Amino acid sequence: MPELRDLYQEVILEHSKAPRNYKALESANYKAEGYNPLCGDRFTVYLEMDADKIREIGFQGAGCAISKASASMMTQSVKGKTKEEAEKIFHRFHDLVTGHGQGEDAELGKLAVFSGVSEFPMRVKCATLAWHTLEAALEGKQEKVSTE
Ligand code: ZN
């Protein structure tokens, strides 16, 4: 499906050029830093948690188009979700980009644009960096996470 593939590419480029929730949150009560040494992607994820719920989320940093678009779309998909819901989405997203998904996964919505990443193992780390960083922030870990 070449057309679909082009569309996916477009969504990723668009998000990498104009990332959503690209800001340091002053109200953050949790944050974590993530680094992918293979590509040089580096992001900080900020969370404002209201008990178990992600009330506000932001991220900042630098990286390739895939890592940045993934971070941008990650913030959109977990905002307003509980910690447990966000972790569930991450696991499904992880299955998708590693090629272990069940095909079309309606619950992933727009995140499905990353399904092509499963063909490029090196890129899986780019696509999952922000999610690993989110997980670390949710766990309240202060140390830096690395994909290596
Ligand atoms: Zn990258």
Image (spheres, rainbow, N blue to C red):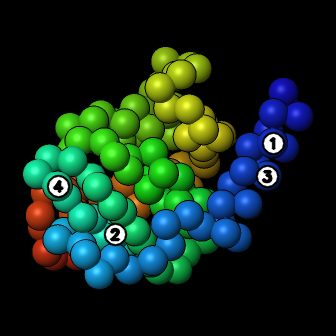
Is residue 40 shown to the viewer in this render?
no
Relative image position of residue 146 (x, y in whole percent): 30, 69
Residue that numbered label 4 is attached to: 50
Which sits earlier in the primary sequence, circle 3 or circle 2? 3
SS category of the residue bearing label 1: helix
Figure quadrant of the C terminus: bottom left
Q: Are marks 1 and 3 in contact (CB under 8 Å)?
A: yes
Q: Are marks 4 and 3 in contact (CB under 8 Å)?
A: no
Q: Residue at coordinates 53% horizontally, 22% vertically from top-left? A: 106
Residue that numbered label 1 is attached to: 7
**Labelled disc at residue 117:** none
SS category of the residue bearing label 4: strand
In terms of depth relative to the viewer, which is nearer, 27 or 84? 27
Relative image position of residue 102 (x, y in whole percent): 49, 18
Q: Is residue 76 left or right of residue 15?
A: left
Q: CA distance from mark 4 to mark 3?
A: 34 Å
Q: Are marks 3 and 2 in contact (CB under 8 Å)?
A: no
**Labelled disc at residue 10:** 3
Q: CA distance from mark 2 to mark 1?
A: 27 Å
Image quadrant of residue 6? top right
Q: Nearer the viewer, mark 4 or mark 1?
A: 4
Q: CA distance from mark 4 to mark 1?
A: 36 Å
Q: How many marks?
A: 4
Which sits earlier in the primary sequence, circle 4 or circle 3? 3
Figure quadrant of the N terminus: top right
The amino acid type of the residue labelled 4 equals Asp
Q: CA distance from mark 1 to mark 3?
A: 5 Å
Residue that numbered label 2 is attached to: 45
The amino acid type of the residue labelled 3 equals Glu
Q: Is residue 7 above or below residue 19?
A: above
Which sits earlier in the primary sequence, circle 4 or circle 2? 2
- Number of other residues with Cα within 10 Å of mark 2, as a class: few under 14, some 14 to 19, many 20 or more: many
